[in-house]
Amino acid sequence: MKFTYKAERDGETYTDTIEATDRFEVYRHVRAEGGAVISVISEKQNNWSVTYWNSKFSTVKEHDKIVFASNLAAMISAGLPISRALSVAERQAKNPKLKSVILHVRGDIQKGGTFHEALGRFPDVFSKLFVAMVRAGEESGTLDEALTTVGNQLQRSYELKKKIKGALIYPSIIVVAIVGIGFLMMTEVVPTLSKTFTELGADLPKATQAIINVSDFLVNYTLLVLLGVLGAVAGVYGILRTAGGQRGRDKILLSTPLIGELVKEINAARTARTFASLLAAGVDILTALQITGEVVQNHYHKDVLKAAAEKVQKGGQLSDTFMKREDLYPPLMGEMIAVGEETGALADMLLRVATFYESEVEQKTKNMSTIIEPFLMLLIGVTVGFFAVAMIGPIYSLSEAF
């Protein structure tokens, strides 16, 4: 149950909210803080309230996690106890689910638990990377630095995703517009022209007849077509949920011109930054490789990281695995790791690699719209030209005949 209490400490009055089993636990908590309770109000959860259901079914966005990590790092660095810092973070949080999670985390810490164990209870909110970094910070006494590193890591990842999504928005809008206009043309315009051709008894070319046949099918079986499209989308989604489907998707992406090279650089940047952040926080190399493998999305890159962990476990060089898989990781990755191993500055070398490939990805995503635009214009031109020749051509022929 949640309790909001008003207390006095060192002549100052303050208000806070905690999760406790009863009022006596609230009094014990305040006394442990060196304060005296003035008033306590219980906040019974209403299972029918919008806030309750929001906290259950809403999601915590990447940006919310970045703000949480950054603000918590700043407060701990300023000398606030973790429990007090979490209380402030809970009041600042706008997301109802995050507020609920922070409240539970704070309650676990007040009961004697560690911060990373409390975060680990919410794997849908805090990734293994987040938990591992916090654990390393707790054990080394540099929790504020660990949280700052986590915030920076999440920020870089968030910005990279935004740039990639931004580059895909324009092509996606064009493709959706083409499909939508094409469907309307086939179901509204073509039937009218087809009726005119039939009334005039025109001898139609094969291309025109093919368009009319497709149009008739769409008009007569509209519901069936829509259900078929939904079924196909659901089928593809289901296949992509399986391990085999995901590997097939990853293989196609890596083999696609332009996109394949971009996928390699994105995974190189993500691998380098995640691995570097974990090593800098004091996480051992095998655990860092395992967590990095979970962060990287492409299954073929996961295989490389798994092989690298096995190589290191047997006493081999980490760089050897990356140098052998230059079909997936750029040559610079293996070379910089080798330099890092030789100089003892592996984390620094990986950060340089991450910065370099993040810049490369940023530049390529900026140019993506420029590269794709001519192909889209060509596609539109060919589609419109084919339709014009197939449907308008017979009209001119009929007009000349009369």
Image (spheres, grey):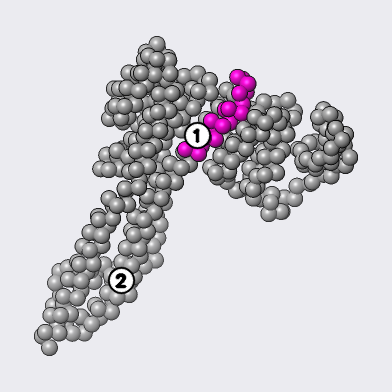
> In this image, 211 relative to 238: left or right?
left
- The mark tally for this picture is 2
Estimate the x, y position of residue 306 in percent, counting from the top left: 40, 24
Name the residue located 26 percent from the left edge and 67 percent from the top edge. 214
- Tag 1 near tag 2, CB within 8 Å: no
Residue 370 percent coordinates (x, y): 29, 52
Classify the position of the N terminus by image quarter: top right
Is most of the magenta stretch helix, strand or loop?
helix
Give the farthest residue toward the left.
401
The answer to whether one can see residue 213 in this image is yes
The picture quadrant where one finds residue 388 is bottom left
Kind of residue at disc 2: Met
Query: In the picture, residue 322 is in which quadrant?
Result: top left
Is 154 colored magenta in this rendering?
yes
Q: Earlier in the sequence, mark 1 or mark 2?
A: 1
Q: Residue at x 54, y 32 (%)?
A: 150
In the rendered image of this protein, does residue 29 appear above or below residue 320?
A: below
* Position of residue 45 measured from the top left corner of the image (x, y, whole percent): 75, 47
Residue 185: assigned label: 2
Specify few, some or many for label 2: CA neighbours under 10 Å numbering under 14, 14-19, or 20 or more: some
Name the residue carrying label 1.
Answer: 153
Region of the chain picked out in magenta, as a range: 138-156
For label 2, the SS is helix
Is residue 319 left or right of 401 when viewed as pictured?
right
- Residue 50 x/y as whole percent: 68, 54
